[in-house]
Image (tube, helix red, strand yellow):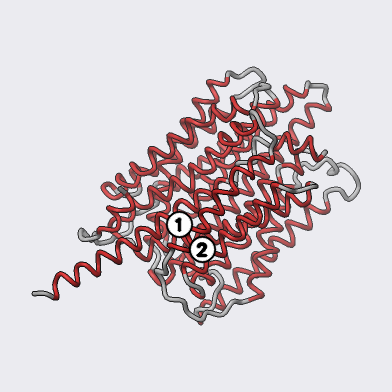
């Protein structure tokens, strides 16, 4: 009789420990992901201070996401080799160091390098959170917990411009980093003290050639996208960097895939592509890519439109974008509970339709569009994305065998960031090409910029139609719920 209470107490202690680990990871991940878009409102000020153009300025966001895309594939192996605590400390140390360098950057190049250091920490934190959840949360109730993850993944980038706008209303852009730094250091110290290991490290080899191929592959493709419409395209040889980037990037990606297919036979792949054996995982990846491109492309274009076309100040811009971030935060846990009850398709289909509708609405903006029309469009987009991210994370990873969780998390993180970086680069490139052509034809800067942004959203709207179609093909993985799982009750509230 006396042994029974001891068993129950031991289980409860483990649950409480894991719950604390998850909460620390959630908060830390929110802080680091916030920096994906917090610079978007400040880019105009930074361009002015460092005397760089819009194409260089947008690399503060693109380089951040590109670094994530390059580093995240490696984390699939790192999470198997090192403990939860060690990976957390490494992530927050890198992020804090990058934030300090950015706050004190004397030239644009140093600021750009600081963003890369920040992103290296963020790249570790995202898969660490996802893999930990898949390890300690019962399959039948992951939807509720993934709802909280969706808050982190979607709301943090959405409210980044709002926080930046409030800061820039009275302070210089450097204070954005001074605002984040003490929070990051506090999370580092608390995490070093409280985070405990929830996995067992193993000696897994890292294939250096795969790392090199991923760097050239993902980096080349995104750099090529960023060169579309560059001001030197019309000069002799001006298009050569773009062509070379696409050729090198494409060839490296093909070689990377072939390398993984060979290595995974002996379980040595950097990214094990057997995860794509699940059609649900594969379709979820496609939807995730379109959704992230839509979110981050919109987040960077709307501030540019509101500043350069409508002439609004940063504080008003931040406040205008705030309701969308709040909506996503409020709906993400709701979406998680609805997923647990109804499955993926009933959320993904209406979510993808709303996302597409918002992009079509934004494709009609002009030089005199009302800010309230933009607010309405942003709200529609936010509601749609809130009902997309949670079921995509949950169904996608839930369809992957348990031994591939770290690889599935890394692949989702990689695709998110490559799609986000590509979407941002493509949207800005389309805007630049269109506005430059109209300016050369005699249009005013305001009209040309508005037309360029409208065309970028139109292309995004057309692409989103494919996401609507894909939403019908995501199936809810068959799992058995564990009613005794107290961890989800503690984390999901």
Check if mark 1's residue and mark 2's residue have beta carbons within 8 Å: yes
Q: In the structure shown, which secondary structural element does the residue marked by tag 2 occupy?
A: helix
Q: Residue at x 47, y 72 (%)?
A: 83
Residue 433 position in % (x across, y down): 75, 36
Q: Is residue 224 left or right of residue 196?
A: right
Mark 1 vs mark 2: which is more N-terminal?
1
- Quadrant for residue 453, please give it: top right
Q: Residues within 10 Å of mark 1 (few under 14, many from 20)?
A: many
Residue 73 position in % (x across, y down): 57, 65
Distance in Å between CA atoms under marks 1 and 2: 8 Å
**Residue nearest the viewer, comparing 302 with 361:** 302
Q: In the structure shown, which secondary structural element does the residue marked by tag 1 occupy?
A: helix
Disc ID at residue 234:
none
Residue at far right of view: 236
Q: Is residue 155 above or below residue 283?
A: above
Q: Residues within 10 Å of mark 2 (few under 14, many from 20)?
A: many
Residue marked by disc 2: 88
- Quadrant for residue 217, please give it: bottom right
User: Which image quarter holds the N terminus?
Assistant: bottom left
**Residue nearest the viewer, comparing 222 with 363:** 222
Residue at far left of view: 1
Q: Residue at x 35, y 52 (%)?
A: 145
Residue marked by disc 1: 25
Q: Is residue 353 above or below residue 101?
A: above
Residue 346 position in % (x across, y down): 33, 43
């Amino acid at each position: 009789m006396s042994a029974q209470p001891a068993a129950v107490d031991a289980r409860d202690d483990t649950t409480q420990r894991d719950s604390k680990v998850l909460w620390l990871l959630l908060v830390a991940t929110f802080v680091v992901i916030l920096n994906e878009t917090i610079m978007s409102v400040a880019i105009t000020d930074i361009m002015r201070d460092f005397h760089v153009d819009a194409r260089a300025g947008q690399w503060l966001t693109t380089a951040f996401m590109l670094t994530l895309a390059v580093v995240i594939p490696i984390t699939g192996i790192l999470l198997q080799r090192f403990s939860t605590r060690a990976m957390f400390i490494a992530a927050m140390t890198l992020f804090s160091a990058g934030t300090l360098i950015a706050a004190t950057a004397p030239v644009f190049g140093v600021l750009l390098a600081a963003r890369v250091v920040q992103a290296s920490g963020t790249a570790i934190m995202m898969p660490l959170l996802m893999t930990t959840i898949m390890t300690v949360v019962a399959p039948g109730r992951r939807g509720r917990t993934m709802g909280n993850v969706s808050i982190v993944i979607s709301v943090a980038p959405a409210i980044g411009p709002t926080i930046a706008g409030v800061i820039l209303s009275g302070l210089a852009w450097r204070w954005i980093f001074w605002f984040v730094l003490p929070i990051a250091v506090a999370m580092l110290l608390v995490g070093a003290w409280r985070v405990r290991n929830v996995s067992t490290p193993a000696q897994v080899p890292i294939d250096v050639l795969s790392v090199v191929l991923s760097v050239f592959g993902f980096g080349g493709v995104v750099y090529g996208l960023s060169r579309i419409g560059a001001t030197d395209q019309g000069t002799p040889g001006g298009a050569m960097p773009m062509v070379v980037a696409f050729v090198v990037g494409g060839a490296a990606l093909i070689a990377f895939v072939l390398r993984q297919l060979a290595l995974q036979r002996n379980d040595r792949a950097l990214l094990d592509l057997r995860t794509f054996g699940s059609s649900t995982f594969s379709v979820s990846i496609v939807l995730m890519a379109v959704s992230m491109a839509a979110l981050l492309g919109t987040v960077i274009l709307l501030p540019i439109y509101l500043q350069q076309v409508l002439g609004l100040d940063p504080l008003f811009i931040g406040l205008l974008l705030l309701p969308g971030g709040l909506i996503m935060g409020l709906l993400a846990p709701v979406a998680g509970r609805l997923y647990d009850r109804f499955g993926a398709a009933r959320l993904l289909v209406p979510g993808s339709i709303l996302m597409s509708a918002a992009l079509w609405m934004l494709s009609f903006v002009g030089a005199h569009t009302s800010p309230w029309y933009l607010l309405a469009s942003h709200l529609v987009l936010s509601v749609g994305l809130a009902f997309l991210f949670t079921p995509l994370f949950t169904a996608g990873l839930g369809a992957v065998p348990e031994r591939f969780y770290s690889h599935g998390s890394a692949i989702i993180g990689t695709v998110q960031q490559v799609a986000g970086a590509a979407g941002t680069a493509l949207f800005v490139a389309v805007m630049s090409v269109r506005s430059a052509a109209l300016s050369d034809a005699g249009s005013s800067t305001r009209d040309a910029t508005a037309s360029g942004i409208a065309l970028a959203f139109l292309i995004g709207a057309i692409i989103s139609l494919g996401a609507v179609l894909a939403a019908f093909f995501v199936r809810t993985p068959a799992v058995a719920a564990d009613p005794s799982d107290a961890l989800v009750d503690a984390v999901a509230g």
